[in-house]
Image: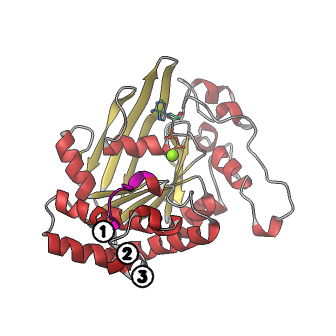
Amino acid sequence: MKKNDPLLDVKDLRTWFHTRDGITRAVDGVSFSLYPGETVGIVGESGCGKSVLFYSLLGLLPSPPARIESGRAFFQGEDLLSVSPERLRTLRGRHMGMIFQDPMTALNPYMKIGSQLMEPLLVHGLSSKREARERAVEMMKAVGIQDSETRMQMYPHEFSGGMRQRVVIAMALVARPELLIADEPTTALDVTVQAQVLALLAELQKKMGMTVAFITHNLGIVSQLCKRVLVFYGGRILESAPVTALFTHPLHPYTAALMASLPRAHQTGRALATIPGQPPEKGAPPEGCPFAPRCRHAVDACHSRDCPLLPCGEERHTACWRVQSGELKEMMP
Ligand SMILES: Nc1ncnc2c1ncn2[C@@H]1O[C@H](COP(=O)(O)OP(=O)(O)O)[C@@H](O)[C@H]1O
Ligand SMILES: [Mg+2]
């Protein structure tokens, strides 16, 4: 791999669910790259396909009903969508770490914390038992768990919610993966603990230098943690931009609407703006821009043909015909 090659390169991924009620196009033609060492935010309202996207890459979706209809996903040159299940399991354990939203689903309630931390190393034959123990203790210290030797002998229920999420982070990172996928990792935590866990993730990223895909519906978190953002809607990416550019000058009407719905410290007391209409329930409609039904700028073309994600300014991409044609310029929130 060359220095500027992406660590992960996803091309035209489509993941649909085939159920008795019909087809849900959860992910519908998504392309993006993640580069070594960067922290990228994946944002969008709940149900827009963020989790399904990454579960597809990790081979964690139940099939049926999930089916990958198209796409390639090169991770360090290997296509995650066509490697064997065994290879994918190895990649998942050693090279890609995942933090789930609810720490309890990631932890085994009947297994000591220490054994759970050592497991990824032992299963993949990365180290001897003694080494694994040392690395587990070291990782517990790194995530700020004091008295780690004693804590190794404890069970998940003896830990608080915040401590459990620290353990889950330690588990995801103990094998030193190149890619960390954090799927709403602080949603289940209260605000103070949330801030501590975010600070911890930022610190670990700096220290270990891994690439982080940070999935969240919280734009505030993105502005603190991420350098670049992918804005998701209805199973598609509608905009990608460096974080500062996105916040100061959103291009896509959906991004602008999302920004406008953000509470601001200096505007307390003002009613929260909401985006009119409902997010699409079954992912993108077959034709047109997925946001068109809710977009106050939409014209006929938006309803009949979806706009691909096209370059629009420095390091920016947007999927909006009206922005591309230059008709919409100032999408200030
Ligand atoms: N196992 C499943 N069976 C059917 N539909 C699913 C399944 N899992 C997710 N979906 C659908 O896929 C879409 C995207 O979901 P998801 O990726 O979880 O959204 P989010 O952006 O909140 O992470 C939603 O419409 C959801 O209902
Ligand atoms: Mg999700």
Instruction: State the residue position of label 2.
Output: 151
Dot 1 amino acid type: Gly
Q: Residues within 10 Å of mark 3 (few under 14, many from 20)?
A: few
Q: Residue at x 21, y 63 (%)?
A: 121
Depth check, front residue: 73 or 61: 61
**Residue type marked 3:** Gln
**Secondary structure category for the residue under label 1:** helix
| SS type, badge 2 | helix
Marked residue nearer the N-terminal end (3 or 1): 1
Q: Which mark is residue 114?
A: 1
In the rendered structure, the answer to whether residue 132 lies left or right of residue 290 reads: left
Instruction: Identify the main secondary structure in magenta.
Output: loop
| Label annotation for residue 146 | 3
Question: Mark on residue 320?
Answer: none
Q: Are marks 1 and 2 in contact (CB under 8 Å)?
A: yes
Label 1 crowd (10 A; few <14 / some 14-19 / many >=20): many
Give the residue displayed 63% in from the left and 67% down from the top.
191
Q: Nearer the viewer, residue 223 or 148?
A: 148
